[in-house]
Structure formats: C-alpha cells, structure tokens
C-alpha cells in the first residue's frame, strides 16, 4: 500500500517539475517575442521622431536601430532574469495551490519593472509620466505568456475532471 502511495507521490512531483519547465519555456518564448516587439516599436518611435525633427539621415537611422536593438536585448535579459528569479518560483507556488490566473503575473511584472526602473533612475512619476511607456514591455510579455499558458491550464483542469478515481485495493 505504501509503495503505491510513494509511486503516486513521485509521479505527482515529476508532473509538477514538467509543468514548471514547460511554463519556464513559455516565459522565455514570450520574453524573446516581447523583446523583439519592444525593439521594433522603439525603432519606429525614434524614426518617427527623426522625421518630425527633419533630421532623418543614414547615421541617425543606424544609431536609432542600434539603440532599439540594445533596448530589445535589455528587455529580454530583464525578462529572462525575472523568469528565473521571480516568475518560475511564483508559478510553482500558484500551481501547487491550483491558482491558475494570469493577473498575479501582471502585478508582479509591473512591480519588477518599476523596481528595475527605480534602480536605473528612470522610474515613472508625476514629473515624467511619459516613462509609463517603459512599463509596457513587461505587460506585453505577461500577456504573451498568458496566451500560451492559459490553454494548458484549461487542458489540465479538463483532464483532472475526467480522470478516473484512484485505485481501490480490496483485501
């Protein structure tokens, strides 16, 4: 009897680790896409600014492209670090308690980004409300992660509801 219980516990632990690894992979994929989108939007905004200032030239466009690329890499690296240090442990904790909602991830992303921007001296405030745009990459990344993970949560809920009851041993 104990052996069956031990095997069930081991299987559940393995399943938890697989779900956490899968969630981490989805987080990294969302971070890559979010970094790319952030770089593209940054480039478009900078080129638009150059056009408005009538300062559009090859060197300015190349400089804007390099700045956008660096911004995209920074967004990805920040998202990767947050996925490793904050979001994966948070996912494991929420999954253990069967809390399958995306809003805790949004709040955490906003907090992580605000703290990071505060450390860099670029935090949004009343004196610089335009810096609120710096919070958008994190919201975008969590939204992309939610689009990838919510179907898996639904499938897990459906499979748990359809699973047959455990074995009953009759002695």
Image (cartoon, rainbow, N blue to C red):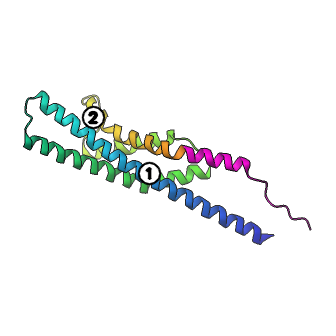
Residue, far front? 58
What kind of element bears circle 2?
helix
Is the residue marked by circle 2 packed among few (<14), some (14-19), or many (20+) residues within 10 Å? some
Residue at 18% across, 36% down = 46
Instruction: Calculate the distance from the C-alpha at mark 2 to the C-alpha at mark 1.
Output: 24 Å
Q: Is residue 126 visible?
A: yes
Look at 27% across and 34% down and name the residue there: 131
Query: Can you say which quadrant of the picture contains the N terminus?
Result: bottom right
Res 53 → quadrant: top left
| 79 with respect to 69 (left or right) | right
Q: Residue at x 22, y 49 (%)?
A: 70
- What residue would you read off at disc 1? 27
Q: Position of residue 139 (x, y in %)?
A: 40, 39
Specify whether residue 99 is in view: no
Magenta span covers which residues?
A: 151-171
Q: Quadrant of the C terminus?
A: bottom right
Q: Secondary structure at mark 1?
A: helix
Compared with 154, 11 (above or below) is below
Left or right: 171 as drawn, with respect to 62: right
């Amino acid at each position: 009897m104990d052996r069956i219980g031990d095997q069930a516990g081991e299987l559940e632990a393995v399943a938890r680790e697989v779900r956490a690894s899968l969630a981490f992979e989805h987080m990294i994929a969302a971070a890559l896409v979010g970094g790319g989108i952030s770089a593209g939007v940054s480039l478009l905004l900078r080129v638009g600014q150059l056009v408005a200032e009538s300062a559009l030239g090859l060197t300015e466009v190349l400089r804007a492209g390099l700045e956008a690329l660096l911004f995209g890499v920074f967004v990805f690296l920040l998202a990767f670090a947050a996925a490793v240090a904050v979001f994966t442990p948070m996912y494991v904790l929420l999954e253990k308690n069967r809390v399958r909602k995306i809003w805790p991830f949004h709040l955490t992303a906003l907090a992580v980004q605000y703290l990071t921007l505060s450390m860099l001296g670029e935090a949004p405030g009343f004196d610089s409300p335009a810096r609120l745009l710096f919070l958008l990459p994190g919201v975008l990344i969590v939204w992309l992660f939610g689009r990838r993970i919510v179907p898996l949560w639904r499938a897990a809920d459906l499979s748990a509801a359809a699973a047959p009851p455990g074995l009953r041993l009759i002695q």
